[in-house]
Structures are given as C-alpha cells and as structure tokens.
Image (tube, helix red, strand yellow):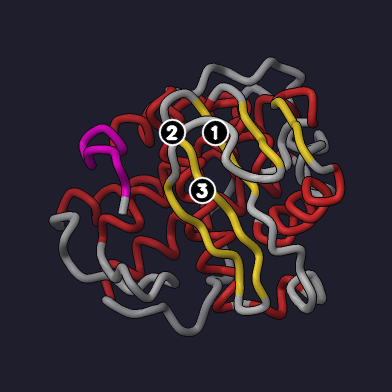
Amino acid sequence: MSGMDFSRLLSRLDGDFNLLRATVAATDLAAPVPSCPDWTVADLAGHVAAVYLHKAECIRLGAFPDPWPPETVGPDPVTALDESYAAMTAQFAAHSPADHSATWYEPDQTVGFWIRRMAQETVIHRADAEVAAGHAVSPIAPDLAVDGVDEVLKLFLGYGSTVWKDDFGALLDTPDTRPVSVSTGHHAWTLTAASSGVEIGDAATGFGGDALVSGEAAPLLLWLWNRAGDDAVRLSGDPELLHQFHALRTAATQ
C-alpha cells in the first residue's frame, strides 16, 4: 500500500513519537488542544496510547481485541505513551510487515498496514501536541507527507466513503461528479464523487479537473486532516466543487 520502505516508516514513526512524547512531557496536561475540540493534552496522550495498545493487540491476537478498551492505559499520560509505544513496536519487531494482522482495511490485513498507519497517526498527533504547547509545528519529512496525502485520499476518503457511507450523511446522495485534482510536487490524484463513494485515482501532475488543490506536501497533509487553514494550500477552480471536497474530507477525517 505505502510507497515508502517499511524501515523508513519505522524510522519516522520513532522520530515523531519522540517529538510527541517530549512535547507532552513539557506541556501543561490540562492545556486545550485547538485542533481536537474538547481534548486536553492529557486526553490526546491517552488517545494515542490507547491506539498504540490496540494495534499491538491486533497484531498479537491476529484479531480485534474484545472487550476493548482497557480500563486504563497507564498511571500517567507520559508513562502510558512509553508503555504502549514499547508494546506496539515490540510487535512490529517480532513480525514481518507481510505477517497477518487484523485491520479495518479489508484489502490489507498485514502488520505493514499498521506500520504505515501508526507513522501517519503519530505525525498528525505530534503536530496537535505542538500546537497545544504553543509551538510551531516541527518539519514533517516530505516523503512521509506525500505518503500521508496518498493514505488520507485513498483509504479515508476513497475506501471510507464506500464502506462507511453513513459517516458522509447526505453528501453522496446527489454529488457533483466533476473531478477535483490534488497535487503536490510530482504527485497528483483525481477525486470524483459518485453516489457509490468517492473514486480516487493517480493522475498526471497539474490541473486535470474542474477544481484544484495544490501545495507543498506537509501543509497539504495538515490541510487534509483539518490541521491547517486554506492559506496553507492553493485553491483554484469552481468554488462549489471545492466546498463539496471540503465537506467530504471533513467527513472522512472526523
């Protein structure tokens, strides 16, 4: 699924986890997280820790853990992050990326799916922590950002809109079916909304649709996850089509 080597994904996962952990440890745990309404820094850390533990169990059991979630994920947020990250990465180390694991993405039931997903989960939430701490978001590796754009478009928007249509409400009842292009550097995708879901395809770079969203990979990734405003990217083309894309990406990333 990923265009990145798994060793590279694991390296980025480790680097971004360390940034996340250091930020949480140095920040008031009661501080609000602007990008995650109603969450504090403690809530953010607890969420990430629970996600890590869940993936460790998905790999260890080869099935989704039940019952879930556990009553507690650790005595304090930083310890919870440490213990859950150690449990997850121990499972990564004990398996090949091709080994079986339960995942929510039916076409890919492998450990490698979670390596990629957790690298992307971690970089977005370390950005959340940095914003909550009042810091500028640390640079995101360009190859990880491109891979993240591909993931959010194809898995969360494309696959998600066909499997979890209820999450999209009435957005796909009578959609505007004109194409939207998303472009960064030498990578581009075309999105076409249909009543059956959003179709995502790789495309030649440049303007190939009735609306275009383009920009550097890291700001584009943050924009797709609603962690950056429209000033982070370049928008052109039909405003109504861009409005529909905004609503679709918001539904996909809730």
Q: Which mark is residue 80?
A: 3
Quadrant assignment, res 96: bottom left
Circle 3: residue type: Ala
Q: Which mark is residue 227?
A: none
Q: Which residue is drawn at 73% across and 52% down?
A: 245
Mark 1 = which residue? 183
Of the pair 240 and 92, the residue shown nearer to us: 240
**Local crowd size for mark 3, using a 10 Å CA cut-off: few (<14), some (14–19), many (≥20):** many
**Local crowd size for mark 2, using a 10 Å CA cut-off: few (<14), some (14–19), many (≥20):** some
Quadrant assignment, res 212: top right
Q: Is residue 164 visible?
A: yes
Position of the C terminus, as image quadrant, is bottom right
Residue extending furthest toward the bottom: 66
Asked if residue 18 is among those painted magenta in the image, a careful observer would answer no
Q: Residue at x 55, y 72 (%)?
A: 69
Q: Is residue 128 left or right of residue 150?
A: right
Q: In this view, does 139 lie to the left or right of 5?
A: right
Q: Given this view, does label 1 or label 3 mark the residue nearer the observer?
A: 1
- Callout 1: SS: strand
- Callout 3: SS: helix
Q: Where is residue 250 in the image (x, y as percent from the top left)?
A: 74, 54
